[in-house]
Image: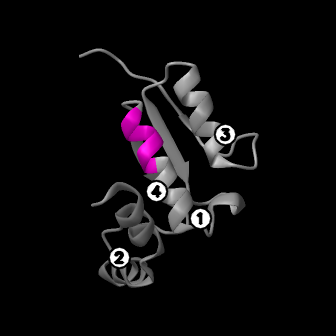
Amino acid sequence: MKAEIGVMSQLTTKDCIDDLKFVIENGFKWFELGLDWEQNFNLSNEKLSKIKKMAKDNNIKLIVHSAWYLPTSSMLPEIKKGVITNKKSYNYCKKSWGR
């Protein structure tokens, strides 16, 4: 298996589209959308659609990085249920990646 490298959004820019353009222009294979960055808290449906299209058109794999305080993989049922009930991360994934 060949190793692939990607970039996480919002490290130094204010717009994740600029980050995705950087990924495309520099030949990276993955783009990670960090939902814990302030710039990504309320991405519009239009921006999510644009991210999805740009990634698909350029064969970029997408990852959604949930905020550290949303432990979606917690073994504690109460925490897991609370996170799933919140659904913010889930809705972003569904809108962006169609899953």
Q: Main secondary structure of the magenta part?
A: helix
For marks 2 and 4, give the one nearer the viewer: 4
Front residue of this view, candidates 54 and 87: 54
Tell me which amino acid carries mark 1. Answer: Leu
For marks 2 and 1, give the one nearer the viewer: 1
At 47% across and 40% down in the image, what residue appears?
Answer: 54
Q: Residue furthest left?
A: 1
Front residue of this view, candidates 96 and 9: 96
Instruction: Specify whether residue 67 is in view.
Output: no
Q: Which sits earlier in the primary sequence, circle 3 or circle 4?
A: 3
Q: Which residues are magenta?
A: 52-57
Residue tagged by mark 4?
A: 49
Q: Secondary structure at mark 2?
A: helix
At 51% across and 67% down in the image, what residue appears?
Answer: 45
At 30% across and 69% down in the image, what residue appears?
Answer: 75
Spatial CA distance of label 2 from label 1 is: 24 Å
Left or right of residue 55: residue 41: right
Compared to residue 24, the image places residue 82 above or below, namely below
Spatial CA distance of label 3 from label 1 is: 14 Å
Question: Which x, y percent locates residue 15?
Answer: 70, 49
Contact flag, marks 3 and 1 (Cβ < 8 Å): no
